[in-house]
Amino acid sequence: MSQRTLVLLKPDAVRRGLVGEILGRIERKAGWTISALELRTLDRATLEQHYAEHVGRPFYEPLMDFMASGPAVALVVEGERVIEGVRTMAGPTDPIAAAPGSIRGDFGTIVRENLVHASDSEESAEREIKIFFPTLA
């Protein structure tokens, strides 16, 4: 079953020059296509919508500051089981727990700056794509 997912290459990925490496991994996955892609600095309103479920948690404000700290790349990836697949490709949030070969396992340094976001369900993907690419919804 074909799906769509939102992927964000976070400001640390852009700062560290890892955009091409991460996009290349996605592009090389057979059957997946990138259907939207944009480099932009995320504003507070967009971030508040995206991270609404985390309001009040101790990591919320540091996360908001980090995500607004520089340009990020937002993209929509389509393909068979792409939601599960991109999350597996990204690896667990903790780069120490992430397996070698995963994005976070190969390039991650700390939990807060973990290079990439990928939607965790079809419902989240639909909601997140509407925030970042309203004309695709």
Image (spheres, helix red, strand yellow):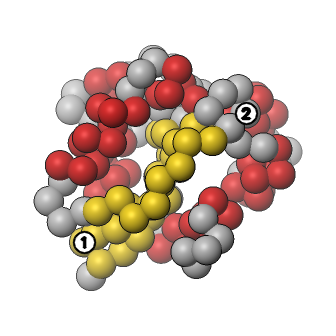
Q: Quadrant of residue 107?
A: top left
Instruction: Tell which tag, 2 or 1, sits nearer the viewer.
Output: 2
| Residue depicted at 22% across the width and 28% down the height | 100
Are the two marked residues, 2 and 1, in contact with CB atoms closer than 8 angstroms? no
The answer to whether residue 121 is visible is: yes
Callout 2, which amino acid? Ala
Secondary structure beneath disc 1?
A: strand
Write down the residue under mark 2: 68
Callout 1, which amino acid? Glu
The numbered dot on residue 80 is 1
Q: Which circle's residue, 2 or 1, is located before the other in the chain?
A: 2
The answer to whether residue 97 is visible is: no
User: Where does the image place residue 104, in percent across and percent down from the top left?
Assistant: 37, 31
Secondary structure beneath disc 2?
A: loop
User: Where does the image place residue 64, in percent across and percent down from the top left?
Assistant: 75, 36
The reply, left or right, for residue 134 in relation to residue 64 is left
Image quarter hosting the N terminus: bottom left
| Residue depicted at 76% across the width and 58% down the height | 49
The numbered dot on residue 23 is none
In this rendering, the answer to whether 39 lies above or below 128 is above
The reply, left or right, for residue 11 in relation to residue 31 is right
Image quarter hosting the C terminus: bottom right
